[in-house]
Image (cartoon, rainbow, N blue to C red):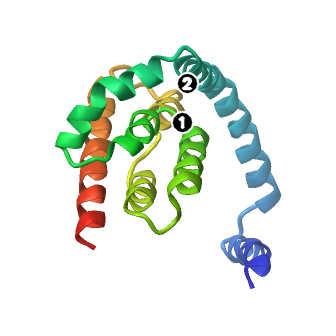
């Protein structure tokens, strides 16, 4: 059934546009043209984030921060084993999934640590990537408050995730 979802949605969109007397082809071309400008504006930010994440992990700074922050995370109820996930999630989505995969292969799928990791991944966001994409093409220049609030939301989500996994 899922293989028919996108074609059905496209057909419904074309029918709806035709009923509203919209030039569908021209609208599509205009949207594609605008997306090229967006990619052009966002690419340097995304490239910088990916480079920083790679350097962060390869330099060993990630491991050092995990060791330093693990006691604080433990105090907050976050298992030490998921500390790296909590630290890297704001920067990278695919790297976070890779960390989750490692946790699940090491501890098993139905384990407290794995459940915490899954919930943390699901309840958090790649703050810096999303900020780069959303704020790159806007006039907003001071994005620091938005990033701070999003990071606080990530840590609160991680704490709540681990608490709920412990209760359930």
Label 1 environment density (alpha carbons within 10 Å; few <14, some 14–19, many ≥20): many
Residue 150 picture quarter: top left
- Residue 161 at x, y = what percent? 30, 58
Q: Quadrant of the N terminus?
A: bottom right
Q: Of 161 and 63, which appears nearest the observer?
A: 63
- Residue 112 at x, y = what percent? 37, 62
Mark 2 or mark 1: which comes first in sequence? 2
Give left or right: position of 16 versus 48.
right
Give left or right: position of 111 versus 160.
right
Q: Is residue 74 above or below residue 87?
A: below
- Residue 14 at x, y = what percent? 76, 72
Q: CA distance from mark 2 to mark 1?
A: 7 Å
Camera sees residue 143: no
Whether the residues at callouts 2 and 1 have beta carbons within 8 Å, the answer is yes
Q: Is residue 131 above or below residue 122?
A: above
Residue drawn at point x = 66 percent, y = 72 percent: 20
Query: Disc 2 marks which residue?
Result: 53
Q: Which mark is residue 92?
A: 1
Give left or right: position of 158 versus 11.
left
Residue drawn at point x = 17 percent, y = 41 percent: 75
Q: Of 93 and 107, which appears nearest the observer?
A: 107
């Amino acid at each position: 059934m899922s293989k028919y979802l996108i074609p059905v949605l496209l057909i419904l969109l074309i029918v709806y546009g035709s009923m509203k007397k919209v030039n569908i082809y021209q609208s599509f071309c205009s949207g594609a043209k605008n997306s090229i400008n967006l990619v052009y504006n966002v690419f340097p930010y995304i490239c910088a984030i990916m480079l920083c994440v790679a350097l962060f992990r390869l330099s060993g700074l990630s491991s050092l921060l995990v060791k330093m922050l693990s006691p604080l995370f433990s105090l907050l109820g976050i298992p030490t084993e998921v500390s790296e996930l909590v630290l890297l999630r704001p920067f990278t989505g695919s790297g976070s999934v890779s960390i989750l995969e490692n946790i699940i292969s090491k501890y098993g799928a139905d384990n407290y640590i794995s459940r915490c990791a899954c919930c943390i991944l699901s309840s958090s966001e790649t703050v810096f990537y999303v900020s780069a994409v959303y704020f790159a093409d806007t006039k907003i220049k001071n994005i620091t408050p938005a990033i701070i609030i999003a990071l606080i939301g990530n840590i609160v989500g991680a704490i709540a995730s681990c608490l709920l996994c412990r209760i359930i």
